[in-house]
Structure formats: C-alpha cells, structure tokens
Image (cartoon, rainbow, N blue to C red):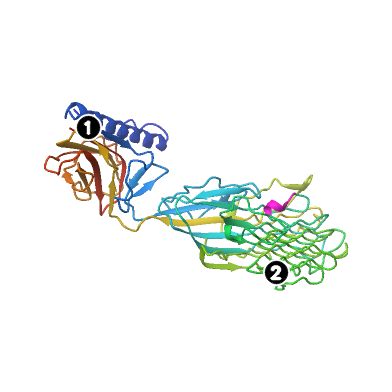
Amino acid sequence: MTTKITSANVDNTIPSSTDVDGNNFNISLLGFKIAVNEGLTVFNLADGVVDEFNDESGIDESEGSNDIYDNVSDFYNNFASRPVSAGFSVRGVTDPASAPGGTSEGVSTNNLSSGQLGSFTVPDALTSANVYMWGTGGGGGGTKDGGFVTNGGGGGFVSGTVAVTPGQSLYVMVSDGVSHDEPSGGTSGTGDGNDRGRSGGGLSYLGTLDAPQFTESAPTDTPGIYMIAGGGGGAGSNPSNPGAPNSGGGGGGGLTGLAGGGFPSAPRTQTSANSGNGGGGDQEQGGQGGSPGGNPGTFLIGGNGGGSHGGGGGGYYGGGAASGSLSQEKGGGGGSSYYGNPNVSSASTTASGNRSSGGNASPFYPSATLDPGFQQNPGVERSPETGVGDGGKSSNPGNTQNSNRGGSGYVLINGTKGTGSNSASIVSNSFTASSEPSTARIVVFEENVDTPTLNTDIIARVSRDGGATYSDATLSDAGYVTGSSGQRILTGTVDVSGQPTGTSMRWKLDLANNEIKVHGVSLQWG
C-alpha cells in the first residue's frame, strides 16, 4: 500500500528550510525507488532500466527537442527561460543585477586576488551573454595643507554581447586598486609609480586565454581576448610640495585612454603626453611617457612611474607614466579599453573623464565592500574606499603620508538560458530487451513548477521498435508528494504487443504548456 506523504506527516520542525527541502527531495527519491521495485514484484516484469539523472548519458539528444538539462541540480525541464548572473570582484561586490531565481552556475571563483584568473563555464542553453566591465581606478596622491587635490584617474567601462557556446570556458581577471608602496606587477596590468607617485589601475579582462601574455611585444593573442576595460592613471604626489593643478591621473578609456593632468574642476580631455604627464594608450600602441624620460605604456601594461610621478593604467595598451623634476607632481595616463573581437557585438565603451568611473552611469554599477583596515603608516587611517572603478582620492589635508587606492575592477556576466518554448520532448537511448516484451511500465520522478495536467501537459510514451512506433501510457499520481514541493511519482502501464516486432526499448516524455522538472525515469518490461 502506498501512502501520500504530505506536510501533515513530514517533520518540518527542522530549523533550516534547506534541510526541510532536502528531506522532502530524499523522501521523493525514496518513493521513486520503491515504485521502481514495485514493478518487479507486483507486475512481475522481467527487466528494465532506471535513470536517476546525474548526467545526460541516458538521453538521446538527437531525438529530443527543447529538452534542457540542468547540470547543477540534475534534472530536465521545458522552461522558457532562466536568468544567469555572475559577478567577479577582488574584495566582495554586492551584485544587484542577479534576477530572482537566477543562478551563478559555471562560476569557479567570484572573489579573486588581484591579477588572478577566475573562470566561467557557459551553462547549457546559454548562447549569448551581456558583459559589463569596469577597469580599476588609479591611486590618489598625498597633498600638503591647502594643496591641490591629486585624484587618480577613474577606470574605463566597456559593455557588449558575447556569443558563447555551452560548455565553453571564459576566463576573467580583475585588479585591485593599489597605492605607491604596494605590489602591482605585470600580471595585473598595473603601472606603478615609485616614491610618492601612485600606481595606475589594472585592467579588467574577459577572454578564452587562461594565461594572457603580459609582454612588451606586439599582441599575438588578440583572438583570445574578447573585452578589456582600461585602468586609470595614478596621481602624482609629493608631500613637500603644496600640489599642482596638473597632477591627477588620466582616466581609463574608451578606445583611447586620457592623459594625466588636471584636477576635479578641469576634466582631463587630452590623450597625448603633455607637460610631463603620461599619455593614454590606444588600440595600436601604449601611451607616451611624460617628458623627459617617462616610461611608455605597452601591450596590456601601464608604464612604471618614477619619483613623485604617477604610473600608467593597464589596458589593451597601457597608459604612459609621468616624468619630470621631483618638485613637480605629474599624473600617469589611462589605459585603453577593447571590444574588437568578432565574438563581441553591440559593444560600447565609456572613458572616465575624471576621477569617476566611466561606468558609474550603468544601471548595474555595483558598490564595493570597504576595506577600512588598510594603513599606509601606523595610526594614520586612509579615507574610505572609493566606488568600483573610481580613481583614488587624494589624502585629506594634513595626512601627508596617506593616500587612497583606486576602486577595484569588476566584471559582470548576465544572460538568459532557455529555448523560449514550453514544449519539449525527452527521449531515451535505445535499450535492448532480453526477449520481445508485450507490456511496459514507466515510472517518472517529476516535480511541478507550474500546475501541469497529467496526460495533457506531460505525456509518457513507450516503444519496442527503437522509436519508430510509440504507444501512450496513461499516467497516474502514485503519491509520495512531499508537502507543497510538487515532487511526485507518476506511473503508467502500456500494452506494446500491437507494435511491430522488436526488442529495442525507448521511453519518451512530451512536455507542454506548464513548466515541469523531471528528475528520473524508469522503464520496465516483460
């Protein structure tokens, strides 16, 4: 005798709703196994197959249509669409773009160390993704009381639609905003200013390369680079000098980064090196180094600054570093963004005209987790963290030894997986019976998402001639429904003796109208 399990006789006093859901599913799974065994005893069926879905090995995808397999929770269904959202950051970013019911499946690591690669494995049924990328802001400089503000340049912003293939691996890199005495390194694409000059911001990267070549040579791996958001240039700084109005870092690109120089009331609009400030990188070459002697930017890397001057921001081509006498305070140039890969469409990029990120107008502009514990000198707290991709602020007057990191980079991948259809067919592989069967029994472990009607919205069919001929089984609810979860066991028997002679057994489920999840199917015969 089977008993329908309901919320009245399931112990739902367990504190965690996750535990309750897990128990409900386990009870349903047990019911599925009992119903399978029941076929061998009550119906005296000779043999059969049981497929509790753990992968797609038992399904013939060439025979089915619109059947979507969830490789995280292991079920097939006929959903119209489902959002996918994955954000990559350095120090924890709240992602407001994740839609209710969305999944971040395929993500290896969300929070990355600066310059570390994370990966995104494209889920089944996802063929395009909308990507939003913020480059890292350049570091802000220190000033003296009454000195000019020497902010770092904001990071650039780029967005576009990327054509993807299920199972494909995309790699993601983001960088942390750094100050003058912290490591930057080529792997994060960060130019670094020495002494009191501040580091440029690192690039953000998306592509198929799991080890981009950060070299000073011409690019050889561009086909593997999908998109890059350029970093902002670092501000110049010299606490012994009250500051100068042309010492801020240049904004990241845009297809061209901006040159260093200017301050909040005078947006930086130049791209070429000027008055000792570093120039912005573009699509063909790194930004010019400030004169005299400033290091230029190179492919992916910003130039290293010297003295009190700012380093260039990383980018497709990095910004140039500033140069000049130690009494001057010059800013590094911003790196360029990139979206020229043929797999990218509907792309656009926005340069940072000043300290603010080029992407601060995006509806997905996230807010970064603050890092108040950073101290450049004992007892001297730095100012609060800036927003994602924003250039670092100059230190408050009087805190001459203190400077701000730029806001860290961020990459957001959004997409919708699904076929846009609620009609689907799931067809099994062929299984060989030891003798020609006349009767078959199908058991389905099914879960309602909507409210399907048996034998209308879910129809079970059985074939003994390899799928050339099918006979319908009349499904009934065998119980084991756990509370309001919608999980249930469906059973049906069918006479296949009227089909053409054969021992090649298949089952087929036709789903329509209402969303349904199928966790497992058993076919028995005799």
Q: Secondary structure at mark 1?
A: loop
Q: Secondary structure at mark 2?
A: loop
Label 2 crowd bin: few (<14), some (14–19), many (20+), radius 10 Å? many
Identify the magenta region.
183-188
Rendered image: mark on residue 258: 2
- Mark whose residue sits in front, 2 or 1: 1
Residue at image coords 41%, 44%:
71
Residue at image coords 60%, 56%:
205
Residue at image coords 30%, 30%:
30
Q: Is residue 1 above or below residue 118?
A: above
CA–CA distance between discs 2 and 1? 75 Å
Which residue occupies the extreme top position in the image? 41
Q: Quadrant of residue 157?
A: bottom right
Is residue 504 or residue 89 the one in the foreground?
A: 504
Could you say where residue 444 lies in the image, as x and y percent from the top left? 26, 39
User: Relative to residue 8, is residue 181 drawn left or right?
Assistant: right
